[in-house]
């Protein structure tokens, strides 16, 4: 099956989010303190596990999108909304906007692009 340009853009966005979530995971494990304000309490195992799982899910979803799997559209919509909810929880529980800004922006853009009629028709979800 030929891959439309919209699906390729979604796959690239999912790959970017896998990288971003991987960096956030390393940051919450305390390995990359230079990516934000240096704080003694930067280590947070719960957030590291959560974002590590999200890294794996985004990498898996990138493969699904690259192969134009029909179920990838719905799964991407669910994961984008879930990731936005997790970012909101991080913000409410003491995180800063600096911790999640790239993730929120990329997820928001993917969600808007995902709902366009041309992208929906590429997955057969008209």
Image (cartoon, rainbow, N blue to C red):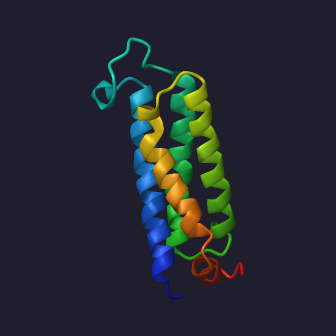
34 relative position to 18: left or right: left
Q: Quadrant of residue 23?
A: top left
At x 56%, y 38%, the residue is 87
Residue at the extreme left of the image, as rendered: 34
Compared with residue 70, is residue 4 higher up or lower down, i.e. above or below?
A: below
- Picture mark count: 0
Q: In which quarter of the image is the N terminus?
A: bottom right
Residue at the extreme right of the image, as rendered: 126
58 relative position to 19: left or right: right
**Residue 54: where, in percent of width, then height?**
55, 45
Compared with residue 15, is residue 38 higher up or lower down, i.e. above or below?
A: above
At x 56%, y 76%, the residue is 68
Compared with residue 94, is residue 68 higher up or lower down, i.e. above or below?
A: below
At x 58%, y 77%, the residue is 119
Q: Quadrant of the C terminus?
A: bottom right
Residue at the extreme bottom of the image, as rendered: 2
Q: In which quarter of the image is residue 84?
A: top right
At x 59%, y 23%, the residue is 93
Q: Quadrant of residue 89?
A: top right
**Residue 105: where, in percent of width, then height?**
47, 50
**Residue 12: where, in percent of width, then height?**
42, 65
The reply to whether residue 85 is visible in this rendering is yes
The reply to whether residue 25 is visible in this rendering is no
**Residue 124: where, in percent of width, then height?**
68, 82
């Amino acid at each position: 099956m030929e891959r439309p340009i919209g699906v390729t853009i979604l796959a690239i966005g999912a790959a970017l989010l896998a990288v971003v979530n991987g960096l956030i995971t390393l940051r919450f494990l305390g390995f990359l303190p230079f990516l934000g304000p240096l704080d003694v309490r930067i280590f947070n195992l719960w957030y590291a596990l959560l974002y590590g799982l999200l890294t794996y899910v985004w990498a898996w979803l990138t493969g699904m999108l690259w192969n134009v799997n029909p179920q990838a559209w719905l799964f991407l919509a669910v994961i984008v909304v879930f990731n936005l909810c997790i970012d909101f929880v991080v913000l409410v529980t003491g995180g800063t906007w600096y911790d999640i800004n790239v993730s929120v922006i990329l997820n928001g853009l993917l969600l808007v692009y995902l709902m366009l009629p041309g992208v929906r028709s590429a997955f057969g979800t008209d």
